[in-house]
Image (spheres, rainbow, N blue to C red):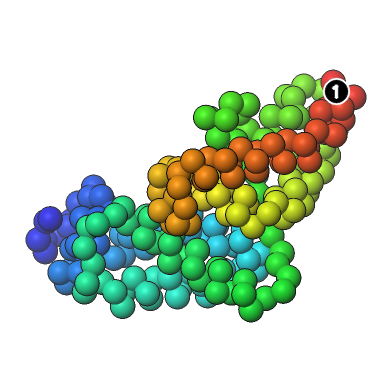
Amino acid sequence: MPGACKGASVALEQYGDEALMEAYRDGDSRAFEVLLNRHRRPVFSFLLRQVGDPTLAEDLLQEAFLRIIRNASSYERRAKFTTWFYTIARNLCRDHGRRAKHRKHSSLDAPLSKEEKGGSLGDVVPDKGPQVDRQVMSRRLKGRLEEAIGQLGPEQREVFLLREGSALSFKQIAEIVGCPENTVKSRMRYALDNLRKALEEYRELATAVQ
């Protein structure tokens, strides 16, 4: 890990999360700034899609970072930093969920897993037909997609967002949610099947404007 010198913050960008966390644990505050800049947006996106409230999502994000700061002195490289971070974020969501009866979900235009084949969920709308009609349909599709994700069961929605919104591996997700990897993959398949069924009506609409 580079010492204090001009341009060191640029050099820090080249290091992995775990090395940065160790540097921060050992007293390099700039390493934490790199971690914050690297993970702030994707973790905020995950939190927002879970709780549906930007202000609440920001509060949960700040609390997640504070917990990392509080536990920095005892950090050991036992698992990937992202696994640890998303576990904290997930637990904060669950704590909030126990206190809240209703949730709202922000819009999401996430791609399907390559492993599941089929490309992006947006691919149900072909890149053909009148431009205006496609734009109208795209808005309708995004609204329907938002609704469909909100209707997923909590376990399916959680896995879907971690996999497609945060690009975590199935192994990492299994560690985060505390269940076997095969269970995570099964939840992902069910989530994708349910989303495809919910969006099936748009195949006919897409054909109509070609």
* 182 left or right of 190 in image: left
Quadrant in which the C terminus appears: top right
* Identity of the residue drawn at 11% across and 56% down: 2
* 154 left or right of 175 in image: right
Image: 205 above or below 90: above
Image location (x, y in percent) of residue 159: 55, 49
Image location (x, y in percent) of residue 128: 77, 22
Image: 204 above or below 192: above
Image: 72 above or below 119: below
* Identity of the residue drawn at 31% across and 65% down: 33
* 10 left or right of 105 in image: left
Query: Can residue 37 be seen by looking at this rendering?
Result: no
Q: Residues within 10 Å of mark 1 (few under 14, many from 20)?
A: few
Image location (x, y in percent) of residue 68: 34, 70
Observer-nearest of 107 and 72 = 72
**Secondary structure state at the residue bearing disc 1:** helix
* Identity of the residue drawn at 11% across and 64% down: 4
- Residue on which disc 1 sits: 207
Query: Can residue 46 be seen by looking at this rendering?
Result: yes
Q: Residue furthest right?
A: 208
Which of the 4 image quadrants contains residue 176? bottom left
Which of the 4 image quadrants contains residue 76? bottom left
* Identity of the residue drawn at 60% across and 54% down: 155
Which of the 4 image quadrants contains residue 194? top right
Q: Which amino acid is tagged 1?
A: Thr
Observer-nearest of 66 and 209 = 66
* 139 left or right of 21 in image: right
Q: How many marks?
A: 1
